[in-house]
Amino acid sequence: MAIHERSLVDPERVLRKERLVIDGIDVSGDWNLIILPRVIEDYDLSFLDEVLEQPEGKTILQCYQCSYCTASCPVHNYWDERYNPRHFIHLARLGLIDELQKRADVMWRCVSCHKCTHRCPKGVLVEEVLKAILRVMAKRGIIEEYPSKKFDKFFLESVYEYGRIEDGELLFGWIEKQGYQVVKDPILKKPIPFMGGVPEWLKQLAVKPIKSMNIGFLILNAKHMLFHPRTKNWNRFKQVLRKVMEEEGVFTH
Amino acid sequence: MAKSVLVVGGGPAGLAAARTLGKLGIPTILVEKEQKLGGRPVLEDYHTLIPRKMTPQQVIGPFIEEVQNNPNVEVKLGVELEACEGEAPSFKVKLSNGEEHEVGAIVVATGFQHFDAKRKGELGYGIYPDVITNLELEQMFSREGKLYRPSNGQLPKRVAFVFCVGSRDRQLGVTNVHCCRYGCALSGLQGTEIREKYPDVDVFCYYMDVRTYGTWEYPFYWAPQEKYGVRYVRGRIAEITYNPQDGRLRVKHEDTIVQRPAEVPMDLVVLVLGMEPSEGTKKVAKILGLAQDPDSQFLVPAEDSGSNIISNKPGVFIAGACKGPIDIESSLAEGEAAGAEAATFIGAKVSA
């Protein structure tokens, strides 16, 4: 049996088998095609509880679905309409897990421009709330850890350890975090620039700014890559930072 | 020229009118069909009134007391207006107890009645015990002080409010096209009361749009949602069914935001009832020849007046819910205005 308006039926709801035998009777053919209903049968209300447990998720209840955020969102407007912060909030509040899962591939695409947060008439910290939703989804295993988070984590680790970031280390260290083969020097175990399996396009991308640097700055950078400087008195700040992060439950290590 | 005023109806608007007239020293006759003053909120044991969150006793109690203690006001309980002859400023009125009086002005405050939820058969009211009206929920709070499922007496895990039952509905004919005006706010308040007392009970409001107008926006929409976690889902409930396997109800609707049909389990469903003109309002309109809205049958003010308490008939003033859905404080204010207007109409002079 043909499905009319096939585009309106989600492929995952169509069950079809080439050969099907039920109770010894061969029912192969068009009649064994089943379209699963798209009726929402229940809410998973514990999802919202978990979002509210996250420090970033506290303002999710303030949303009244006006869509000021989505209308402002560059990702929604210029990249993919499936990225819709207002909609994600609605889905999270009712716990419509299958709908969230359907959008898992776009949900980490936020560019953190914070237009949504600045404009929200209800004071929802939209960008933070979405991060909280993502975290609960990750905890439940319904979204993969998104690539940009690897960079966030590396960035945070660097600041946490030294009180500052080092451009060279951030660039080449991140290349390593992305899974490319990087050659390290035998003594300090630091990645050697442009060695190993770094792809050509990435090399060219890195060479461009290096070429235009003055030699003194280049040497400084190289030195800092080898011997990472630490912000003065950082250890004291670090202890405070650790305490705050632990109290707020955002410790990511 | 007669110097007394007849007030028809002993609810909030009628009481406020009679109180004002009595205080001005004008002989006033207050007729009330029921055996008790106070109108719907008192007769039907409302729990909390919007927007002040006070009980009917707190709000209407002082009005009843003042009216009863004022020697200028003659209260006649169990009495209706039967007939009226003559024009202003000398109406000859006949009451159902056989009395006849001559009055200079009439204040009509005959009020509303609740929509009969059985008329929306698809919502299962009267069929499933766990489908109740918001009036019954009020009485559950005020008379029994607890929330429970009528079918088994236990605390529900989930409560759904179904907005606009008997309002904004052309299917019922032209009579119920108007908005009930109080339903969104009362549901927000009832949801808050439930969540305050039973934090584990999840509350859902199924709405088309939320009309908590003016200063009601924060206390009856934002606060229930932000502070008490009442959930709002956009979509009108089209059908309520019962699942014998788990003994729970199913509310059938489309979640218009997700654009998917839904049949979600609920333990208690509360129908938010619309307002209709009371039988008394329709009857009094015929006796006095007052203009009615051709659709809803509510009384309408005079076309050439900007005031909404001036009727089409000189000497007759209309106040409160007989003109359409209204909240308590506006009803009281209109009663007071109509009382003062009637006093000036009969030419009463206030002695210094």
Image: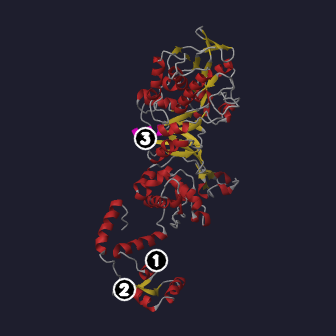
**Label 2 in the same subunit as label 1:** yes
Q: Residue A193 vs residue B298: left or right?
A: left
Q: Which amino acid does label 2 sit on?
A: Leu
Mark 2 nearby-residue class (10 Å; few <14, some 14–19, many ≥20): some
Q: Tag 1: residue type?
A: Gly
Per the image, the residue denoted by label 2 is: A226
Q: Residue A103, percent across and down?
A: 55, 60
First to last magenta residue range: B190-197
What's under tag 3, amino acid-wise?
Answer: Arg
Q: Is the magenta stretch mostly helix, strand or loop?
A: helix
Residue B16 percent across, percent down from the top left: 52, 25
Determine which residue is flagged by label 1.
A179
Q: Are marks 2 and 3 in one subunit?
A: no
Within 10 Å of disc 3 (Cα), the crowding (few <14, some 14-19, many 20+) is some
Task: Give the residue pinned by disc 3.
Answer: B195
Q: Residue at x 65, y 36 (%)?
A: B169
Secondary structure beneath dot 2 equals helix
Q: Give the distance between the C-alpha atoms of the residues marked 3 and 1, in whole angstroms.
A: 50 Å
Mark 1: give few (<14), some (14-19) or many (20+) Cα within 10 Å. Answer: few
